Amino acid sequence: MEQRQLGTSALSVSSIGLGCMGFSQGYGVADDAQSSAVIQGCIEAGVTLIDTAMTYGQGHNERLIGGALAQLGNARDAVRIATKFGIVRTGDGVHLDADPANIADYCDASLQRLGVDVIDLYYLHRVDPKVPISDSIGAMADLVRAGKVLHLGVSEVTAAQLVKATAVHPIAAVQFEWSLAWREPEIELIPTARKLGVGLVPYSPLGRGLLTATLSDDDINVSPFRKSDPRFQGVDLDRNRSQVKALNQLARSRSLTASQISLAWLLAQGSDVVPIPGTRRLDRALENLKAAEVLLTDDDLAALDAAVPPARWSGDRKSFAVPVTSRPSI
């Protein structure tokens, strides 16, 4: 698979990565053996970026990935692990914590769960409103100097916050939701990231499954993430399904699936883009990876804009946010 450099950093990864959150939360019950098979199958197919976070399943996701990678032998050497800190799930709710005093402990815990000595890409998962982002990045930079982390990233930041972060330490990647169905980042965040030399890692590049053209009502009902997202409710869902129907027709006319043309569209936005689609089925994962072989022409891109105009997607994902209570003690 094509390798892409994340911004101006020295971090090079496969053009499509694997987002692993769904193995542990958000989309109903998952089977660990099946999840491990997906991770290993993707790596065998050329994926080198595996994305996780300490909050996914309250550590379950990192342990799952660590176990799957331990079985790969020499193939493990090519894999780059990205994980995140800052969202903490406890019995009394979901919290944000990017207190510099706690960051080293979060990193050590992730290292232990993953079974590695160094994290390739360590993200601030969310900005803690009680902590200046420059302070959080400063503590993360200490981890680089200590040899525990190679590259730093940020997730779900504003353009202004990204500027502040890069003023403290080089940022290899910014992670954010971006897809044919959600294009707001194109207004300010993406131009700012490119000006700063920061790589782009879109999560939910298939619109939380919407852009696969295979999503059923049952798929929506079993997923806490989709059920609380206005894009999957009522009139908004009806409008979005109409868009997906048009997308699927266009994809089929190019002998592609809706998923493949959606991912190929993202890849065509620039060589600094590395989407991280997630799935719990190996056949779907391998289908997604074939998008890396698709070269969309200017005419194809224009046809996509005409078939699924950005303004016709319905529902505002900004209202779908992490519910936050007070910061926990650790």
Image: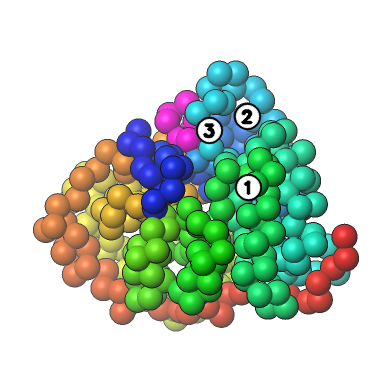
Q: Badge 3 is on which residue?
A: 79
Q: CA distance from mark 3 to mark 2?
A: 9 Å
Residue 26 percent location from the top left of the image: 64, 58
Q: CA distance from mark 2 to mark 1?
A: 23 Å
Q: Badge 1 is on which residue?
A: 144
Which quarter of the image is occupied by the N terminus? top left
Q: Badge 2 is on which residue?
A: 69
How many neighbours does mark 2 have within 10 angstroms: few (below 14), some (14-19), or many (20 or more)?
Answer: many
How many neighbours does mark 1 have within 10 angstroms: few (below 14), some (14-19), or many (20 or more)?
Answer: some
Of tags 3 and 2, the one toward the viewer is 3
Q: Which type of secondary structure does the marked residue at label 2 adopt?
A: helix
Up/down of 322 relative to 271, above or below: below
Q: Quadrant of residue 61?
A: top right
Task: Name the residue at 56% across, 64% down.
Answer: 168
Say if mark 3 contacts mark 1, CB within 8 Å: no
For badge 3, the amino acid type reads Val
Q: Which type of secondary structure does the marked residue at label 3 adopt?
A: loop
Q: Which residues are magenta?
A: 41-48
Residue 220 percent location from the top left of the image: 56, 63
Task: Name the residue at 48% across, 60% down.
Answer: 174
For badge 2, the amino acid type reads Leu
Please identify the residue farthest to the left as the structure is shown: 299
Q: Which type of secondary structure does the marked residue at label 1 adopt?
A: helix
Residue 298 percent location from the top left of the image: 13, 57
Task: Name the residue at 66% across, 75% down.
Answer: 132
Q: How many marks?
A: 3
In the figure, is residue 280 to the left or right of 238? right
